[in-house]
Image (cartoon, rainbow, N blue to C red):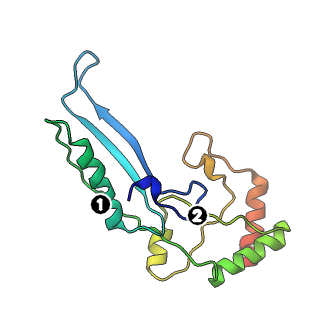
């Protein structure tokens, strides 16, 4: 299935993602490059498997190989499997309860398309929730920042949840 058709209801952008994150090629600005190297980041949704994602990437590569003389080789370097802790899980219910008590309103629950240790923790049978004071729109950017009052509020929620 094409990457833009795979959906999950907990994600703001409701599809899995495929992003070119690095490109390099060429030897000089006045020379036509003989090759190009590209790094692609493919994020999985909880409804996807690693094998289905690898298959969709292979389908894209096969379509790109259509013109004669194009040789595309690829290597998969990592696998952070998707994970989902059920909303009925005690850790999720506890966090919702404490968040609601501290901020006098329920949290907005959503998924996060990111590589985190949560994948490994959930795979090991440890229910895991991603929760913190930061704004994910600024994650891993030059504008990444966290207002101090949000850190204090999160600390209260962590303490009560514990």
Determine whether 110 is above or below 145 in the image.
below
Q: Residue at x 62, y 83 (%)?
A: 89
Marks 2/1 in contact by CB < 8 Å: the verdict is no
Q: Residue at x 71, y 72 (%)?
A: 158
Label placed on residue 55: 1
- Specify whether 126 is left or right of 58: right
Q: Of marks 2 and 1, which one's residue comes earlier in the chain?
A: 1
Label placed on residue 40: none
Q: Residue at x 35, y 66 (%)?
A: 50
Considering every residue shown, the one lying at the far left of the view is 69
Determine whether 31 is above or below 102 in the image.
above
Element under disc 1: helix
Considering every residue shown, the one lying at the far right of the view is 104
Q: In the image, which is nearer the foreground, mark 2 or mark 1?
A: 1
Label placed on residue 111: 2
- The x, y position of residue 111, in whole percent, is 58, 63
Where the C terminus falls, by quadrant? bottom right
- The x, y position of residue 132, in whole percent, is 66, 62
Q: Is residue 39 visible?
A: yes
- Specify whether 50 is left or right of 120: left
Where the N terminus falls, by quadrant? bottom left
- The x, y position of residue 16, in whole percent, is 47, 57
Q: Residue at x 49, y 63 (%)?
A: 116
Q: Nearer the viewer, residue 162 or 129?
A: 129
Q: Nearer the viewer, residue 50 or 15?
A: 15
Element under disc 2: loop
Determine whether 98 is above or below 54 in the image.
below
């Amino acid at each position: 299935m094409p990457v833009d058709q795979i959906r999950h209801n907990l994600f703001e952008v409701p599809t899995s993602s495929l992003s070119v994150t690095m490109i390099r090629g060429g030897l000089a600005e006045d020379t036509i490059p003989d090759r190009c190297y590209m790094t692609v980041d493919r994020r999985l949704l909880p409804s996807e498997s690693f094998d289905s994602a690898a298959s969709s990437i292979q389908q894209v590569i096969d379509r790109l190989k259509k013109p004669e003389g194009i040789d595309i080789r690829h290597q998969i370097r990592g696998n952070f499997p998707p994970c989902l802790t059920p909303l009925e899980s005690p850790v999720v219910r506890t966090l919702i309860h404490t968040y609601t008590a501290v901020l006098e309103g329920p949290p907005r629950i959503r998924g996060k398309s990111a590589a985190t240790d949560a994948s490994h923790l959930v795979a090991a049978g440890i229910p895991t929730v991603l929760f913190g004071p930061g704004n994910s729109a600024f994650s891993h950017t030059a504008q990444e920042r966290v207002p101090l009052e949000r850190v204090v509020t999160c600390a209260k929620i962590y303490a009560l949840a514990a």
